[in-house]
Amino acid sequence: MPYPEGHKLKVRGKIIESAAQAFRTNGIRDISLPFIMKGAGLTHGGFYSHFDNKEQLVAEACRYAIDDTIAYLREAAENAKGDPKIHAVIDYYLSQSHRDQTEMSCILPALSSEISRSSEEVRNVYTQELERMIQFIADVAEVDVSTGSVLLSTMVGTLVLARSVNDPLLSDRLLASGKQQAKELVAS
């Protein structure tokens, strides 16, 4: 019996979602295709009917994860009350929940150190998605792209450091300092 129309596309989406969650939490190198497929509720054998290789999946997962992050940040901005919308974006991005829920958080802090050693295909997609994220931040903050780049860099760097330490109080202080600096950057 044939699969219903759109089945293959739906399965592909489940694989990309599983990969994005896995890469956000564990990086690229330490995640196997069987692990990703299991996370999608599938067997390893079906992978190559959807993707040519892991690199193609990494590129697709980057696109998916940035779409996901922008959607969360856009929602935070739209729900902002009183403060500038960018403050709500900064508060969400540098929150304890965004720090701790790696499987659903921004992929930029998780993969930046690995991307430089990835294929040209992955680096091209990552570059495009980073530029899209910078433009989103610049638009919400109503600043130029250069300032948007600095603002996003501050936010990503803060999140990387807050996740890297094993002292919860220091991690929280890093988040608080990062929020303050990011908001001051926008105000200047």
Image (cartoon, rainbow, N blue to C red):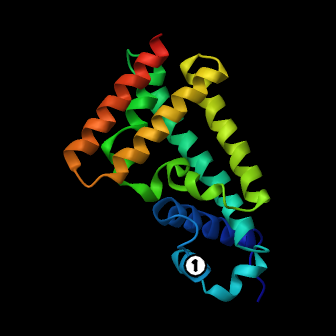
- Does residue 141 appear in this view? yes
Query: Residue 136 location in percent, x, y?
Result: 62, 30
Task: Work out whether residue 17 or residue 131 is closer to the camera in this orientation and state it.
Answer: 131
Q: Residues within 10 Å of mark 1 (few under 14, many from 20)?
A: few
Mark 1 belongs to which amino acid?
Ser
Q: Nearer the viewer, residue 90 or 160?
A: 160
Q: Residue furthest top?
A: 188
Q: Position of residue 75 (x, y in %)?
A: 49, 35
Eyeballing the image, is 121 above or below 72?
A: below
- At 59% from the left edge and 21% from the top edge, which residue is drawn? 147
In this rendered view, identify the residue nearer to me: 128 or 162. Answer: 162
Residue at screen point 70% across, 84% down: 46
Q: Quadrant of residue 6?
A: bottom right
Residue at 34% in and 45% down: 162
Q: In the rendered image, which residue does mark 1 sit on? A: 32
Q: Position of residue 135 (x, y in %)?
A: 66, 29
- Left or right placement of residue 79 versus residue 147 in this view: left
Question: How far across and how far down the image is residue 184, in percent?
Answer: 41, 17
